[in-house]
Image (cartoon, rainbow, N blue to C red):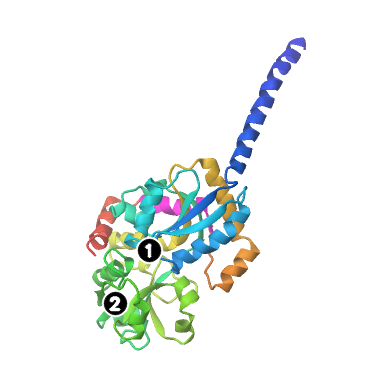
Amino acid sequence: MKGLGTLARRIAPAVMLAVCLTGGAAMAQDDFYAGKTIRILVGFAPGGGYDLYGRIASEFLPNYIPGKPDVIVENMPGAGGRTAAQYLYAIAPQDGTAIGVMVQSIAVDSLIGEVQLDAAKFQAIGRFTSNYEFGVSWHEAEAQSFADAQQVPVTFASTGAGSASSFVPAMLNDIAGTQFQVIQGYTSGLELALEQGEADAMMIGLPILRAGRQDWLNEGKINFLWQLANQPHPDYPDVPAVGQLGESELEKTMLQLVADASDVGRSLFAPPNVPRERIEILQRAFDAMVNDPEFIRVAAERNMELDPATGEALQAIIDRQMSAGDDVVDLARSYISAR
């Protein structure tokens, strides 16, 4: 018994020291953000769908981060969101003070070499919402449905080469027999092109429709031709989902890969080398934010879609995309890189 008592006296100080060190490390992490500023990088101009979610995060996220740092949005438009992604990956601080609302196609962009990075190395913080993007035609256009688009030519306004508004119609032409005639170069004014009859159709996200073009929905000014998703949106069950099209297994898998971007949607990511304990702080803060009734109320007030997912669930989506086979990636590249 005397030996055990001596051993206990020797161990106790070491245990206490370990507890103190562990507690001290946790407190150090909790204090890290005090007095600091977190930048949320958005790879698109102010006012768009990605920007809206970055802005609302800048308002609410500080409330749930120990130390209550300032959170600001920094717009870094270029290359369809890829400039900001590349910056976040390789140049931004890797200490948890720079995060980004990532372009939803980041995994596919990484796989086909549109960006020089490994998307699987980004660290997912959480998803605000999935993002269903629709091919829509103007109510006066000849093509009122997907079946119509297989029968008559449809001029399709696109932002430019490499964008989904360019390569998705091309995929559908080859795989589903549609007759989209893509007109590139609309850096802005896509909606105006439809309203003025310059084009029959365009691609637009549901969050943007509901937040900024509710009149189109209320007044029946557009028709839904297809949706870039693997499963139809609950509100539009009869609109063909791109991920459910294709004849061969290769075509189907490739379309599913491209459509998987809708599951990434509007999401926050951190750079690859941010310490894990800080990622967990940001993930906990994000989860608390999207479950806050006041956040939900404000988002609804702004007509913003919410379909949140945890960082862990979001990471699994990215990992699933990054596991695509070479034949699938090569087929996707043949469309995306050429257009």
- Closer-to-camera residue (337/271): 271
Element at badge 1?
helix
Instruction: Answer whether residue 131 is visible to the viewer in this image.
Output: no
Identified by mark 1, the residue type is Ala
- Residue at image position (34%, 48%) is 117
- Using the rendered view, name the quadrant where residue 231 is placed: bottom left
Q: Quadrant of the N terminus?
A: top right
Q: Which residue is mark 2?
A: 156
Q: Which residue is mark 1?
A: 259
Q: Quadrant of the C terminus?
A: bottom left
Q: Is residue 168 magenta?
A: no
Instruction: Answer whether residue 211 is visible to the viewer in this image.
Output: yes
- Residue at image position (72%, 18%) is 8
Give above or below for 167 relative to 112: below
On the rendered structure, is 89 left or right of 234?
left
Q: Which residues are magenta?
A: 309-322
Q: Earlier in the sequence, mark 2 or mark 1?
A: 2
Looking at this rendering, what residue extends furthest in the bottom direction? 140
- Residue at image position (45%, 62%) is 265
Residue 37: x and y in percent read 53, 51
- Closer-to-camera residue (283/40): 40
- Residue at image position (30%, 76%) is 157
Give above or below for 73 relative to 160: above
Residue 183: x and y in percent read 25, 75
On the rendered structure, is 226 left or right of 72?
left
